[in-house]
Image (spheres, helix red, strand yellow):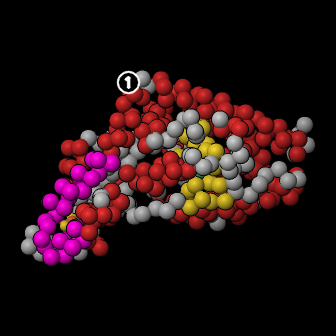
Amino acid sequence: MTELTSRPRILSGMRPTGKLHLGNLVGALQNWVKLQDDYESFHFVADWHMLTTDYADTANLHANTWEMVADWLAAGLDPEKATFFIQSLLPEHAELHLLFSMVTPLGWLERVPTYKEQLDNIKDRDLHTYGFLGYPVLQAADILMYKAQYVPVGEDQVAHVELTREIARRFNSFYGRVFPEPQALLTPTPKLPGTDGRKMSKSYDNAIFLGDAPDVVSSKLATMITDPARKRRTDPGNPDVCPVFDLHKVFSSSETIDRVNRECRTAEIGCLDCKKLLAQHLNESLAPIQERRKPYEQNPQRVWDILEAGTAKARQVAQATMAEVRAAVKLK
Ligand code: TRP
Ligand code: SF4
């Protein structure tokens, strides 16, 4: 099926963080699902990327891979249309990473904006490692291995795709034109705050997960930050500064959004009722996702089977690329 078409190819990876949350859904998954009909899609579990920051604690890596891929399937990614694979099962990625590391100037890596930022921000781990500095080179190998035309990513990853293009150009300049230059396919990412008002993130402990039952969603929303100036029920509020309203804008019907936008400002609606409305809409959005996940929970092996089949398919592409690369570099 996919083999016979000439749809442009996309590739994107996700670190195996375990169960996914609304931020992952809106920031990546929904977009992947939309793209799978028009693009030949490859999506992979970036477990080696996880090690670049979480090398000291790998106990949950395997379980987190299962949980994450089950959520991909639950969100509507279709293994008949898209190919899912596990990075670490394809040593070709490591080999290409090694060859790219020979031609990548250190300065390019030191200048990647996320590098300095994460070194400054992440203090509970030592990130002064070879692997962490080099991880955009690994990402370039992931992308170029499949000669993907497009890489669907959020704003934070655009610099990595740009670096990938530079590595492709430099490699080609030494060894002949092996790699096309991929482009970022920017995912429009609406603001998605967690219950504490900061960006929704597993590590902030403020996330609503795709698998959260209706009562869990309700109780998480009940604790969610609102317009801090609205202290009493009779105070008018301002939805523009309220994180609850940010979630309404993504998950509620336009009628509800309009109503909250109006009645909050006049104190006609209270925060409690406003959150109840949101819980209804959110639970309606999550119900089909949770329904689609059930067969995989009942038969966990199905997820591993899908990954195995996808990895076999990815391996064919990876082996072909590496044969070409070895010949170009005159290794054989
Ligand atoms: N670096 C990406 C992230 O942290 C994950 C990733 C690894 C990726 N390899 C990739 C994304 C290749 C797109 C293409 O989210
Ligand atoms: Fe926020 Fe809704 Fe309360 Fe207005 S009514 S402050 S939008 S939670």
Circle count: 1
Give percent across and percent down for residue 220.
23, 51
Q: Quadrant of residue 200?
A: bottom left
From what the image shows, is residue 3 above or below residue 15?
A: above
- Image side of residue 238 versus residue 111, left or right: left
The quadrant the N terminus occupies is top right
Q: Give the structural element (helix, strand or loop) at label 1.
A: helix
Name the one closer to the observer, 55 or 215.
Answer: 215
From what the image shows, is residue 282 above or below residue 162?
A: above
Image quadrant, ligand 2: bottom left
Q: Quadrant of residue 294?
A: top left
The quadrant the C terminus occupies is top right
Can the viewer see residue 145 in this picture?
yes
Q: Which residue is mark 1?
A: 298
From what the image shows, is residue 184 above or below residue 312?
A: below
Name the one closer to the observer, 147 or 263.
Answer: 263
Task: Specify the segment rendered in magenta.
Answer: 259-285
- Magenta stretch, main secondary structure class: helix
